[in-house]
Amino acid sequence: MSHKITDIQPQKKREGYYSIFLNGEYSFSLSELDLSIANLHIGEQVDETRLLELQKLSQQSKIYSRAIYYLRYGPRTVWQMQEYLNRKAHFELDDIGPVLQRLQNDGYLDDKAYIESYINARQISRPRSKRQLHAELMKKGINPTLINTSLESLDTESQKMAAEEVIRKKMQIPRFQDQQKLTEYMLRQGFPYGLIKEVLVEINSETS
C-alpha cells in the first residue's frame, strides 16, 4: 500500500519540529534536521517499508529531543541517560540505543570528559581519595577500566593536597584533634597511610 505526503507543517508548540501528513491526515513528526535527512517533500509516495522507517526515525527524533532536554540540567553519563530515557521517559531500549550513539557522535555524551570534569569539580569543592572517586563514578555506570585510566592521571601531589584539605577541616572538630582517630577516619576515606602520616607531620611541624 502506498501513501502520499499531502502536507508538511511546522509545529506551533515545538519549535524546530514538523508534522507530516499522509493522505490528508497527520501521521508522524520529525525534527528539522531529521526532515532534512529524510529528504521528504509534498507529493512523494511512501510505501509501507519506507513508512515504517520514517515512523522509527520519528520515534528516535522524540527520544533525541527528550535527551537534549535532560542535558539542560547538567552533563550525564551514557548509563545515566539510558536509565532516564528508559525508566523515566518510558522509551524502549531498542529505540534508545541508536539515539545514545548519536548523542555520543554529536558530542553530547562523553564518559571520559565526564570523569575529568567530575574529578576536577570534586577536588575543588570537596576533595576525595582515589578510592572514593572510583566508588562515586562506578555508581554513575561508567566502565571501570575508563575510570581507572582517568584516576591514574591523579598524581601524588594532587592527592596530598586533597588529604591536607580534609585533615585541616577535620582538625577543627574536637574529636578529630586526637590524631589516631583522625588517621583512622582518613583511612576509611581511602587515603593511603603513608600519605596521611606525611601530611600530619607537616601540619604538626607548623605549630612546633
Image (spheres, rainbow, N blue to C red):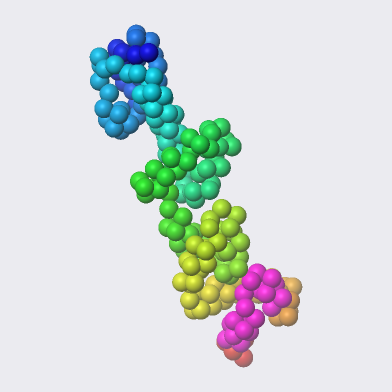
* 193 to 52, vertically: above or below: below
Residue at the location (53% across, 75% down)?
A: 159
Left/right placement of residue 134 relative to residue 188 reads left
Residue 188, magenta (yes or no)? yes
Q: Nearer the viewer, residue 119 or 175?
A: 119
The quarter of the picture where the C terminus appears is bottom right
- Image quadrant in which you'd find residue 65: top left
The image quarter containing residue 26 is top left
Residue 13 seen in this snapshot: no
- Closer-to-camera residue (197/143): 143
In magenta stretch: residue 58: no
Q: Where residue 75 sits in the image (x, y, percent)?
A: 46, 49
Q: Is residue 135 above or below residue 97?
A: below
Extreme top residue here? 24
Determine which quarter of the picture holds residue 50.
top left
The secondary structure that most of the magenta stretch takes on is helix
> Residue 60, image x and y in percent?
43, 33
Magenta stretch, residue numbers: 183-202
